[in-house]
Image (cartoon, rainbow, N blue to C red):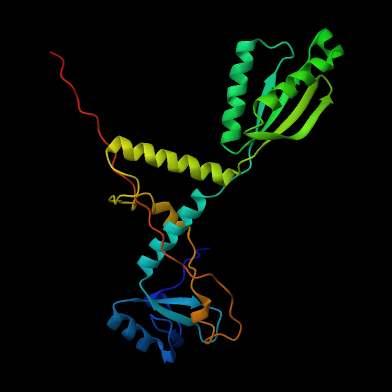
Amino acid sequence: MSTEPRINDRIRVPEVRLVGPSGEQVGIVPLAKALELAQEYDLDLVEVAATARPPVCKLMDYGKFKYESAMKAREARKNQAHTVIKEMKLRPKIDPHDYDTKKGHVVRFLKQGDKVKITIMFRGREQSRPELGFRLLQRLADDVQDLGFVESSPKQDGRNMIMVLGPHKKKTEAMAEARALADARKAERLGRTPGSDAAADDDDLLADDLLADDLVVDDAEVEDAETEAQDAPAEEPAAEAEAPVEQPAASQGA
């Protein structure tokens, strides 16, 4: 079923309780009168409370409202942080060069705000020397102590010994820093300073978002019109600008 609200001529009721474009209560008016006011203000008549008797409708620019809602939803999704546990496997008698490589991966994961599960794999006679794995895990924990801490102490699990490292930095903080660094590098590459104005055209990127977003209105404006109002946060427009990508100049060989 479509979650889109009914607007304009799709509304099929004799009368509606009308809310003005600024949130003022107009009162109960015939549908024809409400549509006439919408045309007069060059706005849309949007049904915001279909279950009320009579239904509550509001005068608004519905296209602009959907665009702003989609932009805010995109910004919220961008800032979402999902907990991820990376895994790194080592051998008790690992080569120094391989150890440095593995440690580099662990450092990168911790900088990204992810947890890291370190697994020491024992084979054959190595199973009788668990202290080798324990010392290796302790060494790794000491090498990355500036970025992470031991969340789960080394434990023997069959042929493996497992330790979990947790990052000091939260995932959201790591994402924000990475995004800021990427913006700074992009700005430097394009020859402009961070924070300068740039034109953006997000119509194609928002095509799918506009189909998925639900209508959210400020219930404070409808509170006087309904007996039982539901709380909903006010929508604030969010804007996002994307800088044009610099195209490399083609060179002609002599």
Residue nearest the viewer, comparing 33 with 162: 162
Check the image and name the residue furthest to the left: 254
In this rendering, position of residue 63 left or right of residue 117 = left
Left of 124 or right of it: where is 103? Answer: left
Left or right: 199 in relation to 151? left
Displayed quadrant of residue 88: top right
Q: Estimate the x, y position of residue 139 in percent, counting from the top left.
A: 71, 21
| Residue 235 location (% of width, % of height) | 46, 67
Residue 62 vs 35, above or below: the answer is above
Q: Which of 208 and 93 is in front in this view?
A: 93
Q: Which image quarter: residue 129?
A: top right
Specify the quadrant that holds the C terminus.
top left
- The tally of labels here is 0
Q: In this view, which residue lies farthest toward the top?
A: 125
Location of residue 117 with respect to 8 vertically, above or below:
above
Who's the residue at 55% across and 45% down the image?
Answer: 173
Would you say 168 lies left or right of 127 here?
Answer: left
In the image, is residue 5 above or below residue 182?
A: below
Pinpoint residue 154: horizontal percent, then vertical percent. Answer: 79, 28
* Residue 38 x %, y %: 33, 81
Q: Residue at x 50, y 83 (%)?
A: 55
Rendered residue at 41%/38% (across/down): 182
